[in-house]
Amino acid sequence: MSAPKRFFVEKIEKETLLSGEEFSHAKNVLRLREGDELILLDGSGKEYDAIVNSVGKKEMICGIVGERIGDKESKTPVKLLIGALKGDKTELVVQKATELGVAEIGVFSSKFCSAYMNDNKLARLNKVAREAAKQCLRSRVPEVFYYQTLESALASCTAYPNKLFACEFAQKSDADLHSVRGGTALVVGSEGGFSEEEFELAKTYGFSGVTLGKRILRAETAAIVFTGVITFILGDLG
């Protein structure tokens, strides 16, 4: 028997309402019926075992039968900032970063960025994060933010003691990645990379430049690899 399916809801009550897209998926795709088991999530880090009590035309009422703390969340927060990418590449980065356990994701515009963002694209990215969180059994969804400038994105990282800036023209890393401990903010540029002035700006916000090796990586590859390396060093993948 397959594991119970997982759904995010806004509020958990003794009898919790499942509506909107989550309801449509539960009813029309998964064909859940009265008596079926499922897991409800409210983004608090808890997981709630539930039973479908009734199925209506626009909503499903689920009775809570148990709760527990989810055990798939990272103990150390990581924030990924990525320059807006062309096509669906930003979606790929959001999906993989969510699977790797990041706490926050920021998408920003910068000098050499040629992609653009709007409310619909941002809503789509948050949906991608939610679906990825369900797939990898997380109990929290990393919220995806959009920053109109690189500076506003950098300024959002004051709470992170470690700040690392992937720079394609850096000759060597200014930080020892192997010694990174504690919350960490990562910055990766768009396809166009960064200017020297943007790198200097990052330094004023406490970021250390790092190199990801002698080969030039695609932006989406760099973001995923950088996140994977740091989460491994922080002990999340060990």
Image (cartoon, rainbow, N blue to C red):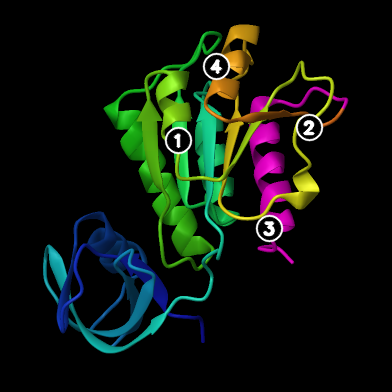
Which is in the foreground here, disc 3 or disc 4?
4
Task: Name the residue beneath numbered marker 4.
Answer: 201
Task: Name the residue beneath numbered marker 3.
Answer: 234
Q: Which residues are magenta?
A: 214-238
Query: What's under tag 1, amino acid-wise?
Result: Gly
Give the mark count.
4
Spatial CA span between label 2 and label 1: 20 Å
Secondary structure, mark 1, is: strand
What residue is shown at x 44% (from left), y 49% (from top)? 129
Q: Along the horizontal axis of the image, is 153 left or right of 59?
A: right
| Discs 4, 2 touching: Cβ within 8 Å | no
Query: What's under tag 3, amino acid-wise?
Result: Leu
What residue is shown at x 54% (from left), y 70% (from top)? 72
Which of the marked residues, 3 or 4, is nearer the chain's N terminus?
4
Query: What's under tag 2, amino acid-wise?
Result: Leu
Which of the marked residues, 1 or 4, is nearer the chain's N terminus?
1
Task: Name the residue beneath numbered marker 1.
Answer: 106
Which residue sits furthest right? Answer: 214
Q: Residues within 10 Å of mark 1 (few under 14, many from 20)?
A: many
| Discs 2, 1 touching: Cβ within 8 Å | no
